[in-house]
Image (cartoon, rainbow, N blue to C red):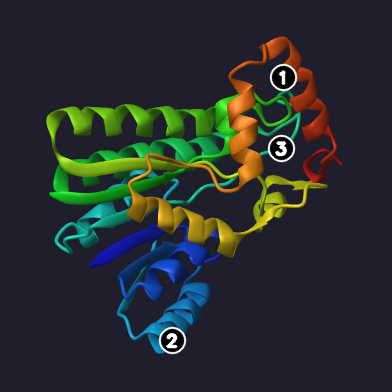
Amino acid sequence: MKALVTGASSGIGKAIATELAKKKINLILVARRQAELDLIKRSLETSYEITVEIRIFDLSTEENCHALFETCKDDHLEIVVNNAGFGCVGLFENLELETELKMLRLNVISVHILTKLFVKSMEQGVILNVASMAGFIPTPNMAAYAASKAFVYNLSEAINYELKRTKKKVRVLSLCPGPVNTNFANVAGAKTGFIGMSAEKCAKIAVNGITRGRHIIIPGFGMKLTKFFLRFLPLRLILPVAFALQRKKDKISAK
């Protein structure tokens, strides 16, 4: 068996790659940073006696998404993890437009392209798209990021239902974590006061969710409880709380 993991040089992507390696699944790891991927490749091949291939791509361009697919379309992948992405934190009017557009190209367009290409080419297997708890509600102070993850979540749910109805042996799942201890805050231009789950624990839950046939994977009981209660609360109550929580983050980009 072979799996593809994008955004694999750090954080959740790296941790998911490690969990898959523990299950003796050969890997294709994708990221922009060659040095980090080389280190991960050596570590996983030594520790788990698997084969790890690396691909250096910036998936924020459509051309690179298609180019990546061309390099692995004949590898008979059974697991594809669309994890590459980043966030922007701050008031919508203050954030740089080009930064937001790059985020949308990576979080939305690349996920859409790769999901489309692999759904059409895979005979069986799983596509895991990394969304977020932020995708379940409009989130002031990270409006575009939350909207991008809502796209990923809703796209994945709809495609998964279509595939079930057409009886194709491909599932499209969404991973919706809450705060996770990764480099997300630094990239987003914020400091966070939240105590997040470790990337390793999140990855273990994600991989277990793949094997158990879950279509929505929400790591942690607290986040599952939050998702449950969100169904009963009106937006007029949710939005002020979401705004207050996000405003606790010190916005480096706004300084």
Q: Secondary structure at mark 3?
A: loop
Q: CA distance from mark 3 to mark 1?
A: 18 Å
Residue 249, quarter of picture: top right
On residue 238, the disc is 1
Q: Is residue 124 left or right of residue 202?
A: left
**Dot 3 and dot 2 residues touching (CB under 8 Å):** no
Earlier-in-chain disc, 3 versus 2: 2
Q: Secondary structure at mark 2?
A: helix
Is the residue marked by circle 2 packed among few (<14), some (14-19), or many (20+) residues within 10 Å? Answer: few
Q: Quadrant of the N terminus?
A: bottom left
Residue 89, quarter of picture: top right
On residue 47, the disc is 2
Amino acid type indicated by mark 2 = Ser
Q: Secondary structure at mark 1?
A: helix
**Dot 1 and dot 2 residues touching (CB under 8 Å):** no
Which residue: 87% across, 41% down?
A: 255
Viewer-nearest of labels 3 and 1? Answer: 1
Earlier-in-chain disc, 1 versus 2: 2
Name, please, the residue furthest toward the bottom. 46
Mark 3 lies on residue: 89
Amino acid type indicated by mark 1 = Ile
Which residue: 46% across, 71% down?
A: 18
- Where does the image place residue 167, in percent across and percent down from the top left? 13, 35
Amino acid type indicated by mark 3 = Val
Is the residue marked by circle 1 packed among few (<14), some (14-19), or many (20+) residues within 10 Å? Answer: some
Earlier-in-chain disc, 3 versus 1: 3
